[in-house]
Image (cartoon, rainbow, N blue to C red):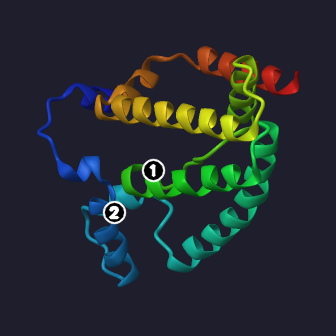
Amino acid sequence: SPWMSLYEGKAFSLKELFPPLMWIPQYWRNLQGIVLDEDRPFVGSLPFSLKGDAIAGVTVGIMLVAQCVAFALLADLPVQCGLYASFVPLLVYAMFGTLRQVQTGPTALMSLIAGQALDSLGITEMSGRMAGAALMSLLVGVISVALGLLRFGNVVSFMSHSVLSAFCTAAGVVIAT
């Protein structure tokens, strides 16, 4: 079964750490109309498309600007923090990400929790809030990279659907209150 492949000992591969080393040549070959049999499992049912990717990039960029400005205001941070928080994760994910269809960047829940954490520490002046948010972001980034290098994402395979549903419901309640 597919989940058993998680337990097979594999040699370290630089391509697994930096997925663009794998998908950029596949993307380039596909744009040239050359599709190798070894590329088919990676392409899946959603083929590579430069026009489609350009449209998606512009659409996401336009939507992300408005969304992240609102998320910065939720956390009581300056607007530029929201803009940085929207584009930097996209650039980092382009280097280390393994899925083509994924959402990165801030969410309403993260913004509310970050704002509440800064409020609970009594940080009210804007420069202090920015420094506190930057420190939280750095810590979360370091922890995320460490967990990624340890392949800790495999733990999600063992979580039941009810646990994930409960998390989503709880997140909705936090946002609503």
Which residue: 72% across, 35% down?
A: 111
- The image shows residue 140 at horizontal and vertical percentages of 50, 31
- Comparing 53 with 82, the one in front is 82
For residue 118, side relative to residue 139 (left or right): right
With respect to residue 152, does 87 lie above or below?
below
Q: Residues within 10 Å of mark 1 (few under 14, many from 20)?
A: few
Amino acid residing under circle 1: Leu
For residue 72, side relative to residue 84 (left or right): right
Q: Secondary structure at mark 1?
A: loop
**Label 2 near label 1: C-beta < 8 Å?**
no
- The image shows residue 100 at horizontal and vertical percentages of 48, 56
With respect to residue 24, does 95 lie above or below?
above
With respect to residue 94, does 97 lie above or below?
above
Amino acid residing under circle 2: Trp
Q: Secondary structure at mark 2?
A: helix
For residue 105, side relative to residue 95 (left or right): right
For residue 32, side relative to residue 71 (left or right): left
- The image shows residue 54 at horizontal and vertical percentages of 58, 75
**What is the distance, in whole Å, between disc 1 and disc 2 at their CAs?**
10 Å
Q: Residues within 10 Å of mark 2 (few under 14, many from 20)?
A: some
In the image, which disc is placed on residue 86? Answer: none
* Residue found at the very far right of the displayed protein: 177
Q: Where is mark 2, residue-wise?
A: 23
Image quadrant in which the C terminus is located? top right
Q: Where is mark 1, residue-wise?
A: 99
Which residue: 27% across, 29% down?
A: 6
Which residue: 63% across, 53% down?
A: 86
- The image shows residue 46 at horizontal and vertical percentages of 51, 62
